[in-house]
Image (cartoon, rainbow, N blue to C red):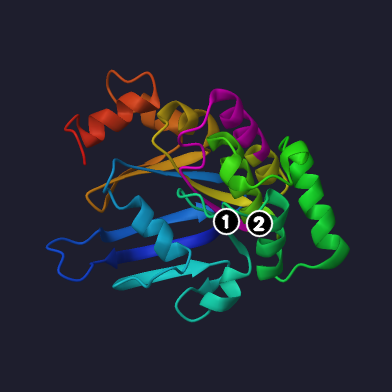
Amino acid sequence: MTNTAIIEIRNLTKTFKNATEPAVNGVSFSIYRNEIFGLLGPNGAGKTTTISILCGLFPATSGTVVIDGKNLQQHSNSIKQIVGIVPQDIALYPTLSARENLDFYGHMYGLKGKDLKDRIEGWLQKLGLTDAANRQVGTYSGGMKRRVNLIAGVLHNPKILFLDEPTVGVDVQSRNVIIDHLKEINNSGTTIIYTSHHMEEAENFCSRVSIIDHGNILTHGTPAELISNTEGADNLEKVFLHLTKRKLRD
């Protein structure tokens, strides 16, 4: 990780039509090259909206986003070429096999031929999916689907990888495999932006985190800094609960 920003967000705001309050309320922060940055918050806090704007899925109401030195509003098509997205919802075709799904996504990224085939086979082997690669994805367990979902987002070796709850609903073994390979991807030079409800996972995985709630950034820092600066906290979950309170969210 370096202290050079690959993503700079300034006064970012998003207000949806007919909403009484903004989903994202003038947030500003930077994400460094080759770090694992966690954007954490309760349901409805604004983290998925923020990530969706950064991915170019819909525009901000106001504010500026600069990614890899380019203004997102002016250069969205070229920025999308260096970005990988692993959404919370499984983005796979259930009646296709893992190989067929990955071949489809590879072609979407402009990959083809032996290069694409080698990348698919390499990732299937790394994530323990080779033996099941010709089965329909609809027959897979949740953990297997998550692993294929991850491969679909990294086949093109993105410079920046967005992960929205990448381990939600999976068993411990699959979660550990996914996290270990995400660390390898990061070590190879990919900047990772990650959202999760797993505070213990975020504490061990992220180099820095921001906690967001009601569209506002509440705090930034390394997990160790946030823990040491919060009275009575000995882990990131206690920091999170101290800042976002214990009221139940929808």
Q: Residues within 10 Å of mark 1 (few under 14, many from 20)?
A: some
Compared with 74, 107 (above or below) is above
Does residue 2 appear in the picture of this structure? no
Residue 134 in the image: state x and y as whole percent: 74, 47
Position of 8 relative to 200 (above/below): below
Residue type at mark 2 is: Asn
Quote the CA–CA distance across marks 2 and 1: 7 Å
Q: For this view, does 3 lie left or right of residue 217? A: right
Mark 2 or mark 1, earlier in chain: 1
Q: Which residue is mark 1?
A: 93
Q: Is residue 92 magenta?
A: no
Residue span colored magenta: 160-181
Say if 220 sits above or below 73 in the image: above
- Which residue is at a point 53% across and 36% down the rendered structure image? 142
Observer-nearest of 162 and 75:
162
Residue at the disc numbered 2: 101
> Can residue 39 be spotted in the picture?
yes
Q: Are marks 2 and 1 in contact (CB under 8 Å)?
A: yes
Q: Residue at x 38, y 27 (%)?
A: 236
Residue at point 53%, 26% (across, down): 171
Q: Quadrant of residue 49?
A: bottom left
> Picture quarter containing residue 239?
top left
